[in-house]
Image: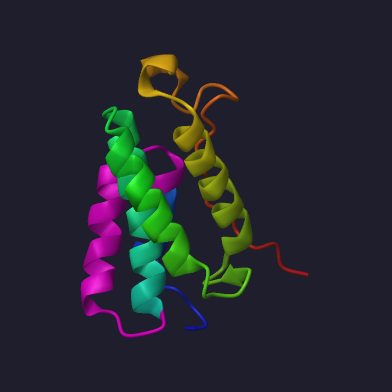
């Protein structure tokens, strides 16, 4: 892992946490294209979760579920904290959302429930707290 993540990564984290999922995808995709392993798969996992949340905001439940699963699976190979973020928390939240989507039909979730209720809690990227 790089000791310091590039500024664009932190911009992508901010975009993710403020619900700018399409912009986050674009920011992280630019990093992903140029990256080498292990960062390449790390960026890809996060950007897939961002795209999943973008799909969710457009009521594309199937696309959201597929990308939540793919992104989570990519990130599972990393330690619980990686790149300065709490990866374990992101995975727990992403898997919890995926489970809700798998158990709930789209017509049971109102458009304004996205991230606004306990029914559909959206994942957030949390920073690792230093000692």
Residue found 57% across the figure and 43% down from its top? 96
Residue 22, percent across and down?
26, 44
Q: Is residue 107 above or below residue 96?
A: above
Q: Is residue 45 above or below residue 17?
A: below
Q: Is residue 107 above or below residue 102?
A: above
Asked if residue 84 is among those painted magenta in the image, a careful observer would answer: no
Residue 100 appears left or right of 47? right
Q: Do we see residue 130 in this rendering?
A: yes
Which quadrant of the view contains residue 61?
top left
Residue 124 appears left or right of 37? right
Residue 119, percent across and down?
56, 24
The majority secondary structure of the magenta stretch comes to helix
Asked if residue 17 is among those painted magenta in the image, a careful observer would answer: yes
Q: Which residues are magenta?
A: 15-38
Residue found 45% across the figure and 64% down from its top? 73
Residue found 62% across the figure and 61% down from its top? 88
Q: In the rendered view, how is the structure colored? A: rainbow
Residue 84, percent across and down?
56, 68
Closer to the camera in the image, 117 or 73:
73
Q: Is residue 51 above or below residue 54?
A: below
Residue found 34% across the figure and 41% down from its top? 64
Q: Do we see residue 11 in this rendering?
A: no
Residue 63 appears left or right of 129? left
């Amino acid at each position: 892992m790089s000791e310091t993540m590039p500024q664009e990564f932190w911009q992508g984290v901010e975009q993710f946490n403020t619900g700018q999922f399409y912009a986050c995808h674009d920011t992280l995709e630019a990093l992903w294209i140029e990256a080498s392993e292990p960062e390449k798969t790390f960026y890809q996992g996060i950007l897939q979760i961002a795209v999943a949340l973008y799909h969710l905001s457009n009521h594309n439940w199937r696309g959201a579920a597929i990308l939540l699963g793919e992104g989570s699976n990519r990130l599972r190979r990393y330690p619980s904290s990686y790149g300065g973020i709490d990866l374990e928390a992101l995975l727990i939240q992403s898997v919890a959302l995926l489970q809700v989507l798998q158990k709930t039909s789209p017509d049971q979730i109102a458009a304004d429930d996205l991230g606004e209720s306990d029914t559909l809690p959206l994942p957030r990227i949390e920073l690792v707290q230093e000692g």
